[in-house]
Image (spheres, rainbow, N blue to C red):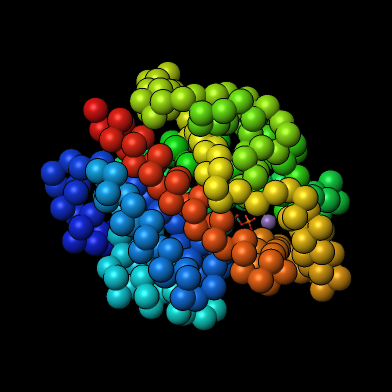
Amino acid sequence: MTLEIRFSPEVKHARDIGLPIVALESTIITHGMPYPQNVETARKVEACVRKNSAIPATIAILDGALHVGLTDDQLETLGQAKNVAKLSRADFAACLATGGTGATTVAATMIAAHLADIRVFATGGIGGVHRGAENSFDISADLAELAHTPVTVVAAGAKAILDIPKTLEVLETYGVPVITFGQDDFPAFWSRSCGLASPIRMDHAAQIARAAKLRAQMGIPGGQLVANPIPKDAEIPNAVLAPIIEQALNDAYAQGVSAKNVTPFLLQRIFELTDGESLAANISLVLNNAKLASQIAVELAV
Ligand code: PSU
Ligand code: MN
């Protein structure tokens, strides 16, 4: 048997004629946002990529088949589906082998993008080192994937549900370039700054693309994390979110939430505790990331 990748007609055409392609993850659809905003956002993100001269390739496993690029119907079905698996490096192949349906996290999307020769990927936030990781050992597989797989991931930094200083330390240990776009501070998802300086700053998509190409030429494995600050008009002040994050973390602890369920639980709880306000910011930053990723994809194609 061989691994088969099912390309959507749009992505197949883009590959045939060499158009720039941007990978998009599906866990943000199934585990990161509620229906119907999840599907609406996924469609807007795809439209944003097209508007910026690239082709979107949303990645998921449907009934045991690896899809790179989803049709509108597939996106809708996935957005409404219940009990979809959340797939990372560990369980990706197992889901294919057993005919399951699963959404891809940052780690799994990077693996699929690389298999499909796609070198840039846009999302909202990456997984990282969880607060209390010194006891729980809960460190997202997204970080190790960035160390292994040559895909540039554009995110709005990491959520403050994580331990951001430890996340940056682990990325440094793994040799992952952390490049903040257009400012000196590393952004924290809903806020433009987490109060820490970014290891690297770049102001042009072309530089980010060039750095990826040079790493490849040097034989350095792994990807790059591009941290793109949320647009100013969509930012939520830290003072507003900090107590909500504390509450969500306390609830997770009290309910004994663990392993894969931690991140989706916290995202859902924050959505509830902000009466959905966190979602508007989330949508704005994902669109902003899709735009920058498209610009990088165009430069990578040069
Ligand atoms: N962080 C967010 N939004 C998300 C996720 C993380 O702000 O949707 C999702 C991504 O798919 C990410 C995954 O790859 O959660 C990380 O999960 P874990 O912490 O279990 O590795
Ligand atoms: Mn985890």
Which quadrant: the C terminus?
top left
Question: On the picture, is 223 further left or further right than 272?
Answer: left
| x and y, in percent, of residue 292 in the image | 40, 39
Question: On the picture, is 295 further left or further right than 185?
Answer: left
Residue 101, can we see it?
Answer: no
**Extreme residue in the left direction:** 17
Quadrant containing ligand 2: bottom right
| x and y, in percent, of residue 34 in the image | 54, 73
Residue in view at x 68 percent, y 27 percent: 197
Residue in view at x 46 percent, y 75 percent: 36
| x and y, in percent, of residue 78 in the image | 42, 74
Residue 178 higher or lower than 99, as above or below: above
Residue 216 higher or lower than 189, as above or below: above
Could you say which quadrant of the image residue 66 lies in? bottom left
Could you say which quadrant of the image residue 24 lies in? bottom left
Residue 300 higher or lower than 104, as above or below: above
Residue in view at x 51 percent, y 28 percent: 182
**Extreme residue in the front direction:** 233
| x and y, in percent, of residue 169 in the image | 71, 32
Q: How many marks?
A: 0
Question: On the picture, is 90 further left or further right than 70?
Answer: right
Which quadrant: the N terminus?
bottom left
Residue in view at x 46 percent, y 25 percent: 203
Residue 244, can we see it?
Answer: yes
Q: Nearer the viewer, residue 219 or 289?
A: 289
Q: Nearer the viewer, residue 46 or 285?
A: 285
